[in-house]
Image: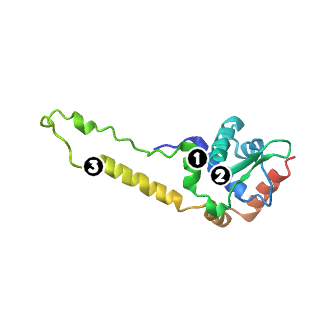
Amino acid sequence: MQLKNQVEWALHCCAILAGVPGDGRLSARDLAELHGVPKEYLSKALQALSQQHLVESTLGPSGGYRLARAPDEISFLDIVEAVEGKASTFACSEIRKNNPCLPPKYRATKTCAVARVMWSADEAWREKLRSVSLADLGVTLSEDVPAGILSDGMDWLLNKN
């Protein structure tokens, strides 16, 4: 399974937005510049987040994006599904029915065993993403990244204009 680049970008942008103080907003242009990604493609990811009510956007010179809910109310799964959609990562096309050795009018009594394993794995993956919030990520980042780097990055973003 390979997710769109926009999933990574959306997760990083939401992590940044979770740290924006008060009613502050960040522009797609500044977020794209910070991460070194194309603004046009990042804007599509941010629009997908907005359509799912994970971020709010405002237009104008002081406009930009901010989280629509508290960081502890937004999971990794919310962000992934906003960008990728909610469809399962595995679609069973029932190729087992093509077996020329099956007796005429044979009907399987159980769902495909391969599909059951893949759907179970998909659900486990989604459950893990569901269990991690942006607030959890913030704790991890504060442990992994030196405080000066985090504060310098936020200062850079907030003082761009």
**Mark 3 nearby-residue class (10 Å; few <14, some 14–19, many ≥20):** few
Circle 2: element type:
loop
Q: Nearer the viewer, residue 69 or 91?
A: 69
Q: Nearer the viewer, residue 72 or 38?
A: 72
Circle 3: element type:
helix
- Looking at the rendered structure, the kind of residue marked 2 is Leu
- Looking at the rendered image, the disc whose residue lies closer to the viewer, 3 or 1, is 1
Real-space Cα separation, disc 2 to disc 1, in angstroms: 8 Å
User: Horizontally, is 132 left or right of 38 in the view?
Assistant: left
Q: Which residue is mark 1?
A: 82
Image spot of residue 139 (x, y percent): 65, 66
Sequence-wise, which precedes: disc 3 or disc 1?
A: 1
Whether residues under marks 2 and 1 lie with C-beta atoms below 8 angstroms apart, the answer is: yes
Q: Nearer the viewer, residue 6 or 72?
A: 72
* Residue 78, placed above or below residue 37: below
For residue 15, which quarter of the picture? bottom right
Q: Which residue is mark 2?
A: 54
Real-space Cα separation, disc 3 to disc 1, in angstroms: 29 Å
**Mark 1 nearby-residue class (10 Å; few <14, some 14–19, many ≥20):** many
- Looking at the rendered structure, the kind of residue marked 3 is Ala
Q: Residue at x 46, y 55 (%)?
A: 125
Query: Which of the numbered marks, if any, corresponds to residue 113?
Result: 3
> What's the image's color scheme?
rainbow
Circle 1: element type:
helix
Q: Residue at x 36, y 49 (%)?
A: 118
Whether residues under marks 3 and 2 lie with C-beta atoms below 8 angstroms apart, the answer is: no
Q: Residue at x 73, y 59 (%)?
A: 19
Sequence-wise, which precedes: disc 2 or disc 1?
A: 2
